Image (spheres, rainbow, N blue to C red):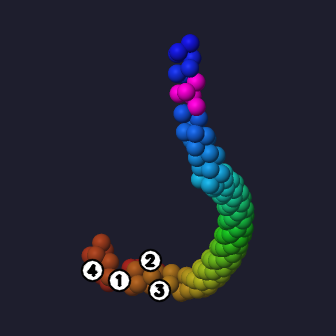
Amino acid sequence: MEIAHQLGKLFLGALPTVIVVLLFYFFLRWAFFGPILKAMAERSARIEGARAEAAAAEAGAKQEMNSYHDALRKARGEIYAEQELARQEALDNRAKLLKAMRARAQEDVNAAKKRIAAELAAARTEVERETPALASQIARAILDKPSTLQGGSGRSSGR
């Protein structure tokens, strides 16, 4: 029983220390750990809120970038369409110009052919008109020549 009595005395001596430790624990919990836990919870909430805001901002930026790329793609398409239209107009103008130049060249060729044909006809007419005179001149020149075959009598007697 002596041990039980000693344990009771030890327990009674330790009781004020236990009470002081419990009071210190509750005081620390109320004055220190409570505000720290509250601050940590608030910090976690702010971090999560900031993450949510960042995710929303990122999604918004991504959507704006997509809309920007769509607008850019549309603008490029319009520019390409305008360039294609301008290119087609230039090709059409070129084709019209080539057609006009070919027609003009063909007219020039036809006019030159007509002029050459007229000059040829005039030359033929001139040659046909002058042919009898030239033929008679040639004949006279041949006949008026002293004949070397007849022995130098001068003129032929067959006339």
Indicate the amino acid at tag 3. Answer: Gln
Residue at horizontal 59 percent and vertical 49 percent from the top: 28
Residue located beneath label 2 in the image: 158
Relative height, residue 114 to residue 35 (above, below)? below
Find residue 137 and name its label: 3
In this rendering, is residue 151 above or below 4?
below
- Determine whether the residue tagged by mark 3 lies in a helix, strand or loop: helix
Q: Using a 10 Å C-alpha cutoff, classify the residue at mark 2 as few (fewer than 14 neighbours), some (14 to 19) or many (20 or more).
A: few
Q: CA distance from mark 1 to mark 3?
A: 12 Å
Image quarter in which the N terminus is found: top right
Question: What amino acid is found at the position of numbered circle 4 in the picture?
Answer: Gly
Name the quadrant containing residue 99: bottom right
Question: Which tag, 2 or 4, sits closer to the chain's start?
Answer: 4
Majority secondary structure in the magenta region: helix
- The residue that appears at 65% across and 51% down in the rendered structure is 30
Instruction: For label 4, count other residues whose C-alpha is less than 10 Å away and answer few (under 14), some (14-19) or many (20+).
Output: few
Residue most toward the top? 1
Q: Is residue 14 above or below residue 126?
A: above
* In front: label 1 or label 4: 1
Residue located 47% across and 86% down the image: 137
Which residue is disc 4 drawn over? 152
